[in-house]
Image (cartoon, helix red, strand yellow):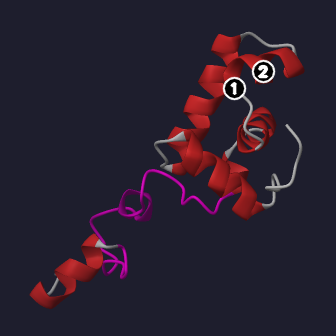
Amino acid sequence: MLALDQAPALAAYEIAPSPSPTRPAASRTRSRPPAQAPEGLTAREREVTALVAQGLSNAAIAERLVLSARTVEMHVSHALHKLGLTTRTQLATWAIQQGLASPDDPA
């Protein structure tokens, strides 16, 4: 049972609940991988993310990768969702932090 003083930390993911014999381990984990897990992205999502970090628009990424703009939009959307992010700026920042792109990379 969760003690009252543990609730705020649990809500902030600072501590994990004690294992419960009635609840399988998989149900105690978060549904989205943390932003630090690039292996959650496909190779194409990583490639598109790196190009987003270079400041390219969906249309420019589509032209460079010979894809439709809609396909690029879906790759961006999936990457955002998998990483728990909401904006292209957050995605670009994450890509730079992960070494997928450099702020000095030419567009």
Position above or below: 5 against 42: below
Asked where in the image residue 15 lies, by quadrant, the reply is: bottom left
Q: Residue at x 72, y 36 (%)?
A: 45
Q: Mark 2: few, some, or many residues within 10 Å (few <14, many ≥20)? A: some
Residue type at mark 2 is Ala
Residue assigned mark 2: 60
First to last magenta residue range: 13-37
Q: Residue at x 79, y 32 (%)?
A: 44
Q: Report whether 76 appears left or right of 56.
A: left
Position above or below: 92 against 30: above
Residue assigned mark 1: 57
Q: Nearer the viewer, residue 64 or 83?
A: 64
Q: Nearer the viewer, residue 28 or 81?
A: 81
**Residue 90 x %, y %:** 55, 50
**Residue 70 x %, y %:** 64, 12
Position above or below: 105 against 3: above
Q: Quadrant of the C terminus?
A: top right
**Residue 99 x %, y %:** 81, 60
**Residue 60 x %, y %:** 78, 21
Residue type at mark 1 is Ser
Position above or below: 52 against 85: above
Q: Are marks 2 and 1 in contact (CB under 8 Å)?
A: yes
Q: Nearer the viewer, residue 101 or 39?
A: 101
